[in-house]
Amino acid sequence: MMVVLIGYMGSGKSTVGKVIAKKRGMGFIDFDDYIEEKEQLTIPEIFKQKGEIYFRKQETAYLSVLLKEKPNAVISLGGGTPCFGNNMDVVVEATQNVFYLKLSVEKLVERLQAEKEHRPLIKDIADIDLSDFIRKHLFERNFFYLRSHHIITVGDETPQGISEKIEKKLV
Ligand code: S3P
């Protein structure tokens, strides 16, 4: 069984993914980590040294490889992964277990303000502008995110609580 978690930066995809994988004895792959290992650079280094277009090309190329390579795993994608090229088509065709972790803009701002530094897309955005940026960005990205098989609304639940909601829907 393959489980794919998608959602905006800071939505808890990796934390929740690890909980599900552990409970079910499955492997877990964080797609950002996978790309970093393949490229032998961190995500901020890739953005800085090679640019976002290079990153997006590699992201699309590695996505198909990973989905073929790991049919039995929980996979957390990068926040932008579903939103470029035909990536979302590839993801929804690979498994029926695609989950969008949906958080409010307020909650995302709260989480991301504290950890902007290692996130190339938001590191240069002033705190005061972050909320507007996320609102607009999410509006564009929702078109892709909402193609998930399931939408999991995340409020104040623990990662365990969220993983239970997801596990009930696995096929
Ligand atoms: C990105 C999200 C990041 C990472 C890169 C770009 C995005 O992943 O892939 O910085 O476009 O939203 P996380 O969502 O895991 O932070």
Image: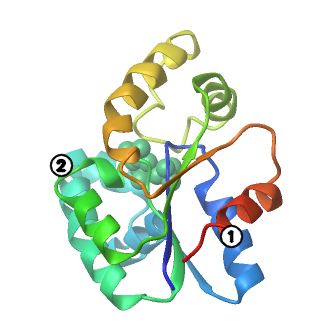
The image shows residue 86, relative to residue 105, as above or below, that is: below
The three-letter code of the residue at mark 2 reads Ile
The residue that appears at 25% across and 76% down in the rendered structure is 64
Q: Are there few (<14), some (14-19), or many (20+) residues within 10 Å of tag 2?
A: few
Q: Are there few (<14), some (14-19), or many (20+) residues within 10 Å of tag 1?
A: some
Which residue is nearer to you in this view: 160 or 153?
153
In the figure, is residue 15 to the left or right of 3?
A: right
Residue under circle 1? 167
Name of the residue lying farthest toward the top: 128
The residue that appears at 28% across and 63% down in the rendered structure is 59
| Residue 63 tag number | none
Residue 3 screen position, x and y as percent: 52, 73
The residue that appears at 64% across and 22% down in the rendered structure is 106
Task: Give SS at disc 2.
Answer: helix
Real-space CA distance between mark 2 and mark 1, rounded to the nearest whole angstrom: 35 Å
Residue depth check, mark 2 versus mark 1: number of the one nearer the observer? 1
In the figure, is residue 43 to the left or right of 88?
A: right
**Residue 107, picture quadrant:** top right
The three-letter code of the residue at mark 1 reads Glu
Residue 108 screen position, x and y as percent: 61, 31
In the figure, is residue 88 to the left or right of 34?
A: left
The answer to which of marks 2 and 1 sits earlier in the sequence is 2
Residue 124 screen position, x and y as percent: 44, 25
Task: Give SS at disc 1.
Answer: helix
The yes-or-no answer for disc 1 within 8 Å of ligand 1 is no
Which residue is nearer to you in this view: 82 or 131?
82
**Residue 28, picture quadrant:** bottom right
Q: Quadrant of the C terminus?
A: bottom right
| Residue 53 tag number | 2
Residue 148 screen position, x and y as percent: 42, 54
